[in-house]
Structure formats: structure tokens, C-alpha cells
Amino acid sequence: MWPTSENHHQSVTKPTTLEKRIKTAKRPIKEIRVRYFGIVVILFILMAESLAVKIFHFGAN
């Protein structure tokens, strides 16, 4: 009785977790891309500003 009930419980829980994973995987891909793109842009701007400051200081000297 015990092993059969455990197996039944596993078979019930596994598909729901898989379905949740698939649903969450399909939806936030665009959100992740937007966040990643935003982070890259911010880093690029910060790097460009620091480079511009260095070049400006070197040019001034």
C-alpha cells in the first residue's frame, strides 16, 4: 500500500511542476532580455563616461 501511494503522489506532482516551469519559461524571456539589455546599456554608458573622462583629462594635460 505505501509504495503505490507514494508513486501515485509523485506522478501527480511531477506534471504540475513541469507545466509551471514551461509556463514561466515561455513568458519572461522578453522580460529577461529587456532587463539584460538595460544592464548592458547602463554598463556601456558608465564605461563610455569613464573613458571620456580619462581621454579628456589626458587631453587637458
Image (spheres, rainbow, N blue to C red):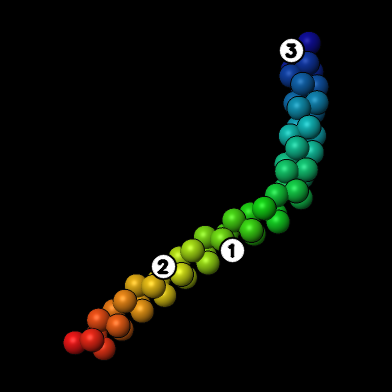
**Can residue 6 be seen in the rendering of this structure?**
yes
Counting residues from the start of the chain, the first of labels 1 and 2 encountered is 1
Q: Dividing the picture into quarters, in which one does residue 23 lie?
A: top right
SS at badge 3: helix
Foreground of the two, 4 or 13: 13
Residue depicted at x 31% and y 83%? 55
Q: Which residue is mark 3?
A: 2
Q: Which residue is mark 2?
A: 46
Foreground of the two, 54 or 25: 54
Q: Amino acid at mark 3?
A: Trp
Residue 37 vs 8, above or below: the answer is below
Label pair 2/3, CB-CB below 8 angstroms:
no
Image location of residue 22, percent across then percent down: 77, 45
Horizontal relation, residue 48 to residue 16: left or right: left
Residue 4 vs 26, above or below: the answer is above
Q: Amino acid at mark 2?
A: Leu
Foreground of the two, 53 or 30: 53
**Can residue 18 be seen in the rendering of this structure?**
no
Counting residues from the start of the chain, the first of labels 2 and 3 encountered is 3
Horizontal relation, residue 49 to residue 1: left or right: left
Residue 6 vs 34, above or below: the answer is above
- Location of the C terminus (image quadrant): bottom left
Label pair 1/3, CB-CB below 8 angstroms:
no
Image location of residue 29, percent across then percent down: 70, 54
Q: Amino acid at mark 1?
A: Phe
C-alpha separation, residue under disc 2 versus residue under disc 3: 61 Å
Q: Which residue is mark 1?
A: 37
The nearer-to-camera label among 1 and 2 is: 2
Counting residues from the start of the chain, the first of labels 1 and 3 encountered is 3
